[in-house]
Image (tube, rainbow, N blue to C red):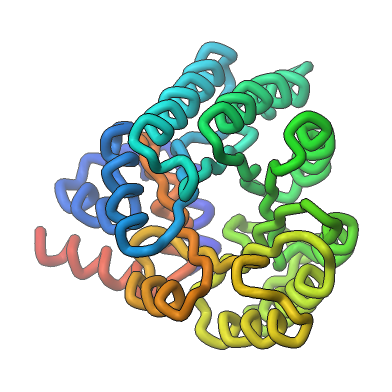
Amino acid sequence: MRQVLLTLSHSNRVRSAVIALPVSRAIVRRYVAGDEVDDAVRATGELVAQGLRVTLDHLGEDTRDIGQAKAVVNAYVTLLGRLAAEGLASRAEVSVKLSAVGQALPGDGEHIALDNTALICAAARDAGTTVTLDMEDHTTTDSTLSILRELRADFPDTGVALQAYLRRTAADCRDLAYAGSRVRLCKGAYDEPESVAFRKRREVDRSYVRCLRILMAGEGYPMAATHDPRLIEIAGALAVRHGRALGSYEFQMLYGIRPDEQRRLAGQGETVRVYVPYGEDWYGYLMRRLAERPANLAFFLRSLVSRG
């Protein structure tokens, strides 16, 4: 079922059908802050008031038009200005998908994405916050890490996400576990071939722990992105084992998933950052969330039946 949902995340026909369903918007509100920058700022304020931190993702990917890529840059610059004006920038950063700012454009896409992301990084620095690069499917990994290296020359606090289900990720963690390096470790949410990715849940979990050990033992700033209670416990134990003080690492969770656990960890003094997506282009994001958690899919199907 997971592979089916990930395949459907690229289907324009299914996308149109899902968007047209009245129930869809109600479900999306559980996982997406809203369509507009006002929604993103509101959600950020609510989470910060609960002692949480935030990373904001303006939804959109696979941009094939330079004008659209510029529009995404402008959306982030506007958002960062609003966060600064509302006094929220010290506790909220932004996450950027490079495919949304031109990485997939033919010819010079990587350089276009680099230039566009540099504009976002500059706006983040002016606001008093940072940027983390999201990781997408495995075909973009080398390009993303290349852009990261370029950005860190001028914006050394730029973070990056790594995906534990890729077989290469332990080596990438070793390369990035240096002082000042911010790395978000997640399991991964794309449909990848077995040649490059672990497919079984147990294998992915083992890889996650291996990667987390490397990051916690290193000199960088690990960001453990997981909702798995066992992995959260392991992350905390590894932090203690390596003598990490509170604030030298953080946990990250998705907006709308395990909010009680987010508040519990924050109440214990842990740094907890909530990944908050917003924007109209929510379909692909929703399908990946359904693929990750069967309970989400069951809720969605029950809602469709009740509306039927």
**Residue at the image point whose x is 45% and y is 77% from the top:** 265
Q: How many marks?
A: 0
Furthest residue to the left?
A: 307
Vertical arrangement, residue 292 with respect to residue 39, above or below: below
Tell me the quadrant of the picture where the C terminus can be found: bottom left
Residue 307 image point, x, y percent: 10, 59
Residue closer to the observer: 78 or 85: 85
Q: Please tell me in which quadrant of the rendered image residue 256 appears.
A: bottom left
Residue closer to the observer: 130 or 97: 130
Vertical arrangement, residue 88 with respect to residue 70, above or below: below
Furthest residue to the top?
A: 67
Residue closer to the observer: 244 or 93: 244
**Residue at the image point whose x is 18% and y is 64% from the top:** 303
Q: Is residue 296 left or right of residue 67?
A: left
Q: Please tell me in which quadrant of the rendered image residue 164 appears.
A: bottom right
Q: Please tell me in which quadrant of the rendered image residue 258 appears.
A: bottom left
**Residue at the image point whose x is 38% and y is 58% from the top:** 255
Q: Is residue 75 left or right of residue 126?
A: left
Residue 209 image point, x, y percent: 72, 79
Residue 163 image point, x, y percent: 69, 60
